Image (cartoon, rainbow, N blue to C red):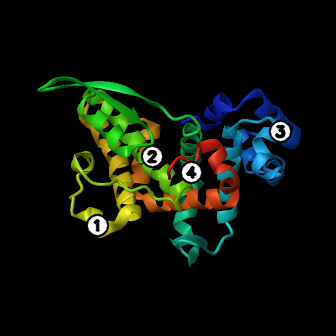
Amino acid sequence: MDVEQRYLEHLSEADRRLLRSVVGANVPVEVALGSAAVEEVVFDHGDQAVVAIGISPFLAFATAVHRTAARLDTATFVEERWAPRTRIPVFDVASLRTLVADPGRRYFLVELLASYTRVSSGVTWTLTRRGWRRQRFSELEPGRLAELLEVVQASERPGIYRRLGDLALFLLGVFPDHPPTLGRGAATERLLRLSGVRGDRVAELGPFELLETLGARWYAAAVASAEAAGQPVTQTLAVAGYIAEHFRDARRVLNAVTDGYLFPWRDQWFGSGDR
């Protein structure tokens, strides 16, 4: 994965001008994003940071992820939400450092955050015994999104599974104080069946732990379904496979990113909805 080129494709001209003005013209983007000077400029205006200086959300997310990685280098613990308004220290920081030490994994997290500033939704038609059935879907509804797995071609399933994994990681990483409930009924039963999770584990795990379990399974399924369809495992899918095995670490990294940088304006960029 040419991470430098990926960043350049996403950064706006205003983003590039800001980076050049702060760190110079010949500094690689990855180095610039880890600069404390860039962090100061990007986040100096608080919850109006992006609007005030005319940069893209992508640059704000990239700066937040890279500066969090830099802070984890010297951190001795991270805070974990244990209950509403209650946090406990977690001292296993080494695994988080390992996760964000890789440029491809840092880029994966940045791209994931940026992808949820615009949420896709639409309509699908499913042929049932009673004829064609119209169904709405949204990327923020795991049950609806999972239903697509039963109507798309095998070649499209890796993308659906990947997006389901993204959704679980996004919700738990950015909105951990509002963990979604999957509810009950046929739609939830179908979601669990497609994910290989027994229905009795819903009450056993609780909503937060269940979504962690599902997120890891969905990322693993993205890789497995690509291999089953005879598709090459891209570098992005390879990162998804790594995160499947280290989902909790990835979630804790995004919790640190949110607590350190995104919390004041997460509703502005991602929408508060009913989370």
Residue at (86, 42) in percent of width and height: 22
Residue position for label 3:
53
In the rendered image, is residue 241 in sight? yes
Residue position for label 1:
203
In the rendered image, is residue 27 in sight? no
Mark 3 vs mark 4, foreground winner is: 3
Q: Position of residue 43 (x, y in %)?
A: 79, 50
Residue contact between numbered discs 2 and 4, judged by CB atoms under 8 Å:
no
The residue lying toward the viewer, choosing from 226 and 157, is: 157
**Amino acid type of disc 1?**
Ala
Residue position for label 2:
167
Gap between marks 3 and 1, in whole Å? 46 Å
Residue position for label 4:
102
Residue 118: which quarter of the image?
top right
The residue lying toward the viewer, choosing from 144 and 215, is: 144
Choose the circle earlier in sequence order: 2 or 4.
4
**Amino acid type of disc 4?**
Asp
Choose the circle earlier in sequence order: 1 or 4.
4
Choose the circle earlier in sequence order: 3 or 1.
3
Residue at (59, 38) in percent of width and height: 117
Q: Is residue 77 above or below residue 274?
A: below
